[in-house]
């Protein structure tokens, strides 16, 4: 069987027998095979090193993907919470606008005029001032959130 693997340097197509191969040719052929084998091993090692580098890059990208997925999930959750907060503020502002509309433009003035005494007038004025201040803050919050 070994005779079938040997080839003459002239490139004949027929297998050689051991009797036709000189020791020098056999040694050269063995040296060539060993050199080729070493080269193949070096090529394999190079490819394996490249594969390992690519694996490291893939691992880093996987970690980054996981990190970005987590960040995206947090942002989506925060967006949902912000939408809920916006809806609450909108509802609150709409309720106040409807109330102000139904009571009319002179509602606060009417409350002041209905005071029984000057101290009652001041107390009502202070309460109306606090209510108007809170309404203004709510309207500004609504304006900032839209």
Image (cartoon, helix red, strand yellow):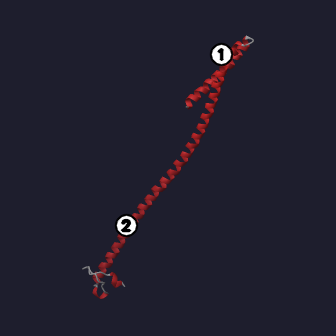
User: In this picture, is 32 found above or below 17?
Assistant: above
Secondary structure beneath label 2: helix
Q: Are marks 2 and 1 in contact (CB under 8 Å)?
A: no
**Residue farthest toward the top in the current orientation of the protein:** 118
Q: How many marks?
A: 2
User: In this picture, is 91 found above or below 26?
Assistant: above
Specify few, some or many for label 2: CA neighbours under 10 Å numbering under 14, 14-19, or 20 or more. few
What percent of the width, then of the height, locates residue 98?
64, 25
What percent of the width, then of the height, locates residue 106?
65, 16
Specify few, some or many for label 1: CA neighbours under 10 Å numbering under 14, 14-19, or 20 or more. few
Q: Which mark is residue 59?
A: none
Q: Which residue is mark 2?
A: 43
Q: Is residue 75 left or right of 4 when viewed as pictured?
A: right
For discs 2 and 1, the disc positioned in front in the rendered view: 1
User: In this picture, is 35 found above or below 136?
Assistant: below
Residue 77 placement: quadrant: top right
Secondary structure beneath label 1: loop
What percent of the width, then of the height, locates residue 22?
28, 85
Which residue: 43% across, 58% down?
A: 54
Q: Which residue is mark 1?
A: 106
What percent of the width, then of the height, locates residue 20?
28, 86
Residues at marks 2 and 1, CA–CA distance in whole angstroms: 92 Å
**Residue farthest toward the left in the current orientation of the protein:** 10
Which residue: 31% across, 75% down?
A: 32
User: In this picture, is 64 found above or below 89?
Assistant: below
Residue 108 placement: quadrant: top right
Quadrant that contains the N terminus = bottom left
Which residue: 34% across, 81% down?
A: 5
**Residue farthest toward the bottom in the current orientation of the protein:** 19
């Amino acid at each position: 069987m070994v005779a079938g693997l040997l080839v003459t340097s002239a490139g004949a197509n027929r297998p050689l027998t051991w009797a036709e191969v000189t020791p020098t040719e056999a040694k050269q052929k063995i040296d060539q095979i060993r050199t080729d084998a070493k080269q193949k091993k070096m090529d394999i090692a190079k490819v394996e090193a490249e594969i390992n580098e690519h694996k490291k890059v893939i691992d880093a990208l996987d970690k980054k993907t996981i990190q970005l997925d987590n960040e995206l999930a947090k942002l989506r959750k925060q967006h949902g919470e912000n939408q809920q907060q916006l809806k609450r503020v909108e509802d609150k502002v709409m309720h106040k606008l409807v109330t102000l509309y139904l009571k009319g433009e002179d509602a606060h003035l009417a409350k002041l005029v209905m005071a029984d005494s000057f101290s009652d007038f001041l107390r009502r004025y202070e309460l109306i001032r606090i209510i108007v201040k809170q309404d203004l803050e709510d309207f500004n919050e609504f304006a900032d959130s839209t």
